[in-house]
Amino acid sequence: MSQLVQPPKGTKDFLPEEMILRRRVIETIRECFTLYGFVEIDSPVFEYFELLSRKCGSEVEKEIYVFEDKAKRKLGLRFEFTSPLGRYYATNAEKLTKPFKRYIIGKVYRYENTQAGRYREFYQADADIIGSYSMNVESELIDLAVFTLEKLSIGSYEIVINNRKILDGIINAAGIDESKKDAALRALDKTAKIGEAGVIKELQENGISEENYRSFMRIIDLDYENETNDNAKKLSILKERIIAELKDESVKQRTVEGIDELSLIIESGRKTAAVSETAELPSEDFIKFDPLLVRGLGYYTGPIFEIKSKDVAIGSFAAGGRYDNLVELYGARPEGACGISFGVERIIDIITQKNVDVLQYVSAPVKIYIVYLTEKEKPFAYKTAKILRSNGINTEICVSSEPNIGKEIKYADKKKIEYVAIIGEREAAEQKLTLKNIKTREEKTVSAEKAAELITKKQ
RNA sequence: GUGGAUGUAGCUCAGCUGGUAGAGCCCCGGAUUGUGACUCCGGUGGUCGCAGGUUCAAAACCUGUCAUCCACCCCA
C-alpha cells in the first residue's frame, strides 16, 4: 500500500465494528460523570501555543503540535485538557457556579513516537473540580474512578497515590537544589524500573550526588524495615521521620501537611470501599501509597495519583492530581483545583486484551433487516419499517432492486443483525411479514406490531 | 529525538545462493430464480511500502525515505 493512502503516523481509522465498543466505553464514562454531577463543557481543539505551554514542562512542550495560522498566530493542538481548562475557567469564571465540576471527552494530540498504547491522536475523558481545597475532592474523584471502572468491567487494577508536597519537602531536606528538582524526581520515579544503581547513575548525570540520593532515600524508603502494605503505618512512620529530620520549619510544616492530606484520602477511600456492594471492588487497601510516584506534568501541587491495570501491562490508563495555582496562571483568582483523566484508547485496549471475543458480545446497533422482493411490496415494506422504528427498533431496509434472499440473509448475518423480515407477495397480501431469527433459523409470519413486540421482549 | 525488528493480494503469510509472484481465508459468479453457516466448480484481485542505485536481469543486494511493532525518552 502506498504511503498516501495510510492515515498519518500515530492515527488510525476505526471500522464500524470497532466503533461499537468505542462508543459504549465513551458513553459509559459520560454516564458515570453525569451520575456524579459533573456537567459537560467543550473548548477548542487548538489554543494559543503560549497558553498551552505555560507550566507544562519542556519535555511536554516538545510534544505539542504547533502551527501558524494565516495571520501568523502561533497555535497548538491541545495535548491534554488541564491547561485548556485553566484558560476556560479564567475566561468564564464569572459565569460559572463554584465549585465548578465539569467534564470533557474529546481528542487530544501529542507529537511523540508511537508504541503500544501510545498514539498521536487519542481520546481523553476528564473530570475536574475547581473551587475547593478540600481533600473531599480527591476522594470524590477516586470514588468516581472506582465506580466508572466497575461499570466498564476493566478487571483488576491498582490506584497509586502520592503527594507533591512530600516529594518537594524531602528533596529540599536532602539538599537537592530546587533547579534540579524535576530531573531528580524523574530519576526517582524510575526506581522500580531501573533499580537503585540506575537511578544513582541518572542522578549523577544531572549533577546530583549519591550523597543527596542517600539522604533522600533515608527519609523516604519504607520497604526495608516495613514490608507491610499498610498505608496508615507507612504514612505515620514517614511523618515521624520528617518531623525528626527536616530542619526548616516551613518546609517541615508543608511536608507534614502532605502526609495528613494523604491520610485523609486513604481513610475516605476505605469508607467508600466499605459502602460499595460490588464484588469486583478491590480490597480496602486498593489505594496504595507509593512515595516514589511522581507524574510528569509541571503544574501539580498536591496529591497525585495513577491507576494501572494488573492484568495488562500498558502503563497507567487513568491519572490525575491537584493543581492549586493553575487558574491563577491564566489570570483568574487563585482556586483549589483537582482532576482526573481517563485514557480511552488504553481502556479499550485493556478490555479487548482481557477478552478477545469482546466484539461478539457487543450487539449490532441494527436489530432487523427488511427485505422486500418486488416493487409491489415496497409501500408495505416501508410502512412496516416505520412501525418498527416508531417502536424504537433500529431497522434497516434493503436497497437492492433485485434482492436475492439468500444473499440478503448472509448480509444480515455478517452485520450481526438478529432478525430478517421477508416481505413478498404472500406476506403483502396478508399485511404481514416473515420474521426470521438468524441464529435459531426460526420463522414466523406475523404483523409488524407483533414483530415489534417479539423483538422488544427478547431484548 | 535515539536504537532494534518488520513492510509481498482485503486478511494471515510463503517465495531457496538474484531469472521479473504463490497458498489459505475473504470477496464475486454458478450448482440452488422465496432462505445464509457444510460441499463442489469457476473467477476477480499485487507497479512485492515508496524513490534511487548495482546488474543482461531485483520482491530478494546497496542507499535513502515513509509506515508499523518493540525498547529508550516521556506519557493517557
Image: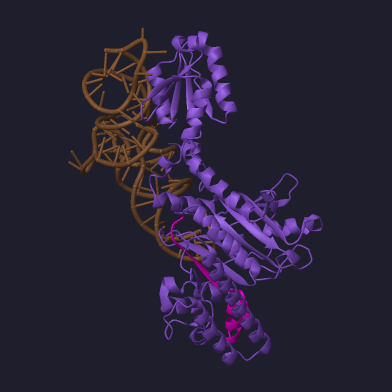
State the image coordinates of residue A183 (x, y, percent, origin top left): 55, 74
Q: Can residue A300 be seen in the rendering of this structure?
A: yes
State the image coordinates of residue A101 (x, y, percent, origin top left): 69, 58
Was residue A289 drawn as part of the magenta stretch in this picture?
A: no
User: Does A312 sit left or right of B39 as displayed?
Assistant: right
Was residue A177 drawn as part of the magenta stretch in this picture?
A: yes
Q: Colour of chain A?
A: purple
State the image coordinates of residue A351 (x, y, percent, origin top left): 44, 51
State the image coordinates of residue A124 (x, y, percent, origin top left): 58, 53
Q: Outermost residue, right direction?
A: A94
Identify which residue is drawn at 48% across, 71% down: A285
Q: Colour of chain B?
A: brown
Q: Nearer the viewer, residue A415 or A393?
A: A393
Identify which residue is drawn at 58% across, 69% down: A304
Q: Nearer the viewer, residue A5 or A138?
A: A138
In this picture the colour scheme is by chain
Counting labels gives 0
Quadrant position of residue A192: bottom left
User: Does B55 sit left or right of A180 as displayed?
Assistant: left
User: Does B49 sit left or right of A302 as displayed?
Assistant: left
**Quadrant where the N terminus of chain A lies?**
top left
Up the image or down, A138 lies above or below A123; here it is: below
Per the rendered image, the range of residues in magenta is: A154-179
Up the image or down, A154 lies above or below A288; here it is: above
Q: Can residue A321 be seen in the rendering of this structure?
A: no
